[in-house]
Amino acid sequence: MALTPDLIRQTHDTIRSATIRTPMVKATRLSMHLGIDLYLKLENLQHTNAFKSRGALAKLLTLSDQQRKNGVIACSAGNHAQGVAYHASRLGIPSVIVMPEGTPFNKVKRTEDFGAQVVLHGSGFDESVQFTLDMAAEKNLTLIHPFDDEVVAAGQGTVAIEMLEDHPELDVIVVPIGGGGLIAGIAVAAKDIKPEIEIVGAQAELFDAAKAQFDMGSTNFGGATLAEGIAVREPSQANMDIIAKYVDRIDSATEAEIEKAVFDLISHEKLVAEGAPGAGLAVIEKHLEAYKGKTVGLVICGGNIDSRLLSTLILRGLVSDGRITRLTFEIDDTPGQLSDISRIIGDGGANVIEVIHQRMMQTVALKQAELEVVIEARDIHHVREIVGALREHGFKVRTDNGV
């Protein structure tokens, strides 16, 4: 079976009653900030909070009665696992999800909560894949592949139909790439509806296998990435053939750029997104001139980001923006110093959220002390005002952000 516009349209008709037609909203603040018309397809509001449930459902609906009775198996530590588990349970199909042994407990639990049997095996994804194939053959289970399947890719491609029905004026669609199923489906559907539309892929620089093949360059693979959902060593060859034919270009972003983009989605649009859609926004911000004067659609493909990681990311974003800043003072070890500093900061409209005062370490003279004060300010300009006032009062102060 080939991935064709007809297959994607048929798949859309088949799955529409059991999937959410997620909203396509204008990113008002980001559009103003970036100077483009940016629209977001909110697949983070889909069942299981990711687009993956579309393809999983599409494949499950093609199974024979005997295949449904035997059950299905998938290998995933993320969104595909939950998509398969959710729809299989809803359809009364037994499901097994194989995950690497180091998979965080919260991901295991969420998958089990959707009704799947989770089997932990292998130190990494490659070991888990082979075990999954062996288990599928041994127990006669049908494998639901996360991206190397025309029906799965057709399910993902239904995203493009909805985007262009809601906003036919789109000039560009930006799509994160892992194994290539999402962008392959979107590219086939979108180019059929509007041949002149641009399709741009987005990857993390640390995991850029699709970009390397597309550009015929060298591949990066390895390291810790925020965009773990698209950290794929080898995309499907069938998907790469479609990408080569229909996709206009693939750009990549650094980890710092992806982190900033995820924070921008939170702070500007109040949207929780994982690292993969962060890569999409990051390549838009990185190559902004290419999008000037265009109406751009970005697929917010998932929102399953770990809450502890999200908390740290927000704090780091606030630090980067200057809204949280650490001030370090060398002060005379005499009464009233801390009181004067606190008063100046308060008079300037900032808030003190942490104070560390030490005199025992030998980083300062015997009759001096080192004082660290963490403040909350409006922005970096406000920090400059506060630091300026402190220096006018004779205090020696330095900051982590060079103010």
Image: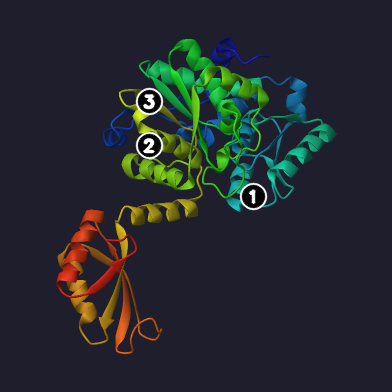
Please identify the quadrant where the N terminus is shown: top right
Q: Is residue 222 above or below residue 247?
A: below
Q: Quadrant of residue 72?
A: top right
Closest to the camera, between mark 3 and mark 1, is 3
Q: Left or right: where does residue 307 sit relative to residue 346?
A: right
Q: Nearer the viewer, residue 246 or 47?
A: 246
User: At x 76% / y 27%, what residue is drawn?
Assistant: 69
Which residue has dot 3 on it? 296
Residue 144: numbered disc: none
Gap in Å between the C-alphas at discs 1 and 2? 32 Å
Camera-nearest residue between 267 and 55: 267
Residue 353 seen from this side: no
For mark 2, what is the residue? 285
- Viewer-nearest residue: 221 or 93: 221
Residue at 47% over, 31% down: 43
Residue lying furthest right: 138
- Closest to the camera, between mark 3 and mark 2, is 2
Name the amino acid, label 3: Val
Q: Position of residue 397 (x, y in %)?
A: 26, 71
User: Can you tell which mark lies on residue 103?
Assistant: 1
Relative image position of residue 61 (x, y in whole percent): 65, 21
User: Can you say whether 317 is above or below 62 in the image?
Assistant: below
Is label 3 in contact with label 2 (beta carbons under 8 Å)?
no
